[in-house]
Amino acid sequence: MHDVLKRLGIDEETYGAAGAGGFYPTAGPLITSTNPTTGEALAKVRLGRRDDYDRVITEAHDAFLRWRMLPAPKRGEIVRQMGEALREHKDDLGALISLEVGKIRSEGLGEVQESIDMAELAVGMSRQLYGLSMHSERPQHRMYEQWHPLGVVGVITAFNFPNAVWAWNAMVALIAGDSVVWKPSLKAPLTAIATHKICDQVLQDAGFGGVLGLIIGEDKVVGDALIRDRRLPLISATGSTRMGRHVSAVVASRLGRCLLELGGNNAVIVHRDADLDLAIRGVAFGACGTAGQRCTSTRRLFLHQDIAEAFVDRLVAAYNTLPIGDPLDEGTLVGPLIDQDAVTMYERAIASIKEQGGEILCGGQRVDRPGHFVKPTLVRAPLDLPMAKEETFAPILYVFTYDDLDRAIAAQNDVDQGLSSAIFTDSFRAAETFLSHAGSDCGIANVNIGTSGAEIGGAFGGEKDTGGGREAGSDSWKAYMRRQTCTLNWGSELPLAQGVSFDV
Ligand code: NAD
C-alpha cells in the first residue's frame, strides 16, 4: 500500500460514509479505486447504502441546527483552520490526486491549493454576508434584506476535480451556516475520504461533528435519494450535462434549488495580430493539460487565415514533443485518462471524426504502454463537423480557420455548452468585440489567457447546457443562503403600501 495513503489515514479497506462521529461501518458493495497510470489497486471502499444515507442526512440536519447559530465570523474561523489543515496535508493530498485520477504533480498540488484558497476566501466572506437596505415608502418604516443559512446542502462532484469542486461549495456553504453532505464520484472515492477526514477533524475538535457528511454510494441508491430528498433545499451538482439534466428535473419537481456546473465545449480564437508565443502556450495547456479532462479544456480552436498555417505547424511540433507518462514523474505534462471507458470514448470519437471528414493532424491513438494513456490529438475540421459540437472528455482539439472575427465568434457560440472562451489578440477592438454583448456567450471570457485555469476570486460557471450555476468567488455565496426581506414599523400608525386603505 502506498505510504501516501497510510499517511492520509486510509486503510486497505475503508468505509464510505461519515456522519456526526466520523466514519462508521457500512455494508454496501465493495469497490476498488485503481491508479489509472498503472492499473494497480490503491484501496477498497465499502459503499454506503440507503440507510447510511438517511443516517448521514439526519446527523447533518441536527448539526445544522447548532451550526447556524454560531456567528458567521466564528464559522469563518473554523473554516480558516480547515484551510490550515489542508495546507499541512497538501503534499500528500496532491499526490493522492495524482495517484487516483492521474493529474500531473503540479496540477494535483494546484488543486489542493485551490481548496486552501477557497477556505481563505470564505473566511473573508464570513464577514461580508451583506444585505441591502431600502427606503420604505411608508413613514417611520425601515426595510432591509438579510441572508439566512439554507439547511443541509447536497454536493455531487465529478471525478476530475475530486478535491477542489467540493471546496468551492463546502467552504462557502459552511460560512453561510449550512451543513454539507458530499456525494463524490465513484471514480475518485479515496481523495474524497482523505479530504473529508482532514476537514472533518477540525469540525469535530470544535464540537461540530455532523456539519460535514460524506456518503459514497451508487447513483441509483444514494444519488437518487439525495436529489429527491426534500430535507435538502439545495443540490449543487458538478458533472456531465446528461447528469445535470436529470438532477435538475428531479430537484425542480420538488421545487428545490439546483446549482449546476456541467459540461463545456470551450474555444480559443487566435486573431491575426495575436502574440503567437502566448497563444501556443495557452492553447497547448488548455487542450492537453489534465489530459483534456477539465470542464474548461480547450476543445475548439479558431485560427485567423493569415496565421493559421504557421500556427498549426508550431502546434503539431509542440504536440509531438509533449512528455506523456507517469504523472508523478518530474517533467511529465500529460498523464492518463481516468479509466478504460474514457479511452474507449476517445477511440470512438476518433473513428467518428474520420467518418465525418475530419483530418487527424497528429495523435489519434492510444499510447503503447500500460495505463489509460492516449495521444493528444489535433483535428483539422470543417466548420460543421458534428463531433466538434460534443464534449469528448479527452485531449482532442478541433482546428478551424476563419477570415472574419464576427463569424468566428458566431461559430464559437454555435454549440450547446457555454462555459469558457478566449481570444488571443493585441487589438483593442477585437478584444472588446469579443467581450461585448454581441461577443462570447460563455460564463468565462478571457483575453490573452487560455480557457482553463480560472481563479477562485471570480464567480465560476457557464451558460446554456453548462447549467447556469456560479460557484467560488464574487457573490456566489448567495446561492447557499436564503434571502429575507424585512420591514419594521417603528411608528404608531399602520399605513399600507400602494395607498391601500383598510380601516377596521
Ligand atoms: P458524471 O456526470 O458522470 O458524474 C458526475 C457526478 O454525478 C458523479 O458524482 C456521479 O456519481 C453523479 N451522478 C451521475 N448520475 C447521477 C444521478 N442520477 N443522481 C445523482 N448523482 C448522479 O461526470 P464525470 O465523468 O464525473 O465528470 C466529467 C464531466 O463533469 C464533464 O462533462 C465535465 O465538463 C464536467 N465538469 C464540469 C465542471 C464545471 O464546473 N462546469 C467541473 C468539473 C467537471
Image (tube, grey):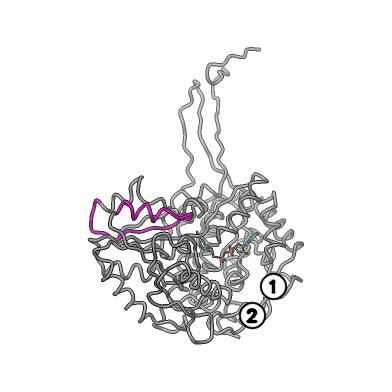
Q: Which quadrant would residue 159 be assigned to in this image?
A: bottom right
Secondary element type, mark 2 = strand
Label 2, on which residue? 43
Q: Please tell me which residue lies in front, 28 or 338.
A: 338
Q: Quadrant of ligand 1?
A: bottom right
Q: Residue 203: x percent and y percent? A: 60, 62
The vertical placement of 167 against 4, above or below, is above
Residue 125 can be seen, yes or no: yes
| Residue 399 among those drawn in magenta | no
Q: In the rendered structure, which amino acid carries the disc numbered 2?
A: Ala
Q: Residue 50: x percent and y percent? A: 75, 62
The vertical placement of 289 against 466, above or below, is below
**Left or right: residue 489 compared with residue 60:** left
Q: Please tell me which residue lies in front, 235 or 91.
A: 235
Q: Do labels 2 and 1 touch, CB within 8 Å?
A: no
What's the residue at 54%, 59% (across, down)? 78
Label 1, on which residue? 15
- Region rendered in magenta: 405-429
- Between the residue at mark 2 and the residue at mark 1, the CA separation in whole angstroms equals 11 Å
The vertical placement of 96 against 73, above or below, is below
Q: Which quadrant would residue 331 be assigned to in this image?
A: bottom left
* Total count of labels: 2
**Residue 104 tag number:** none
Label 2: few (<14), some (14–19) or many (≥20) C-alpha neighbours in 10 Å: many
Residue 112 can be seen, yes or no: no
**Left or right: residue 186 compared with residue 466:** right
- Which is nearer the N-term, disc 2 or disc 1? 1
Q: Which quadrant would residue 437 be assigned to in this image?
A: top left
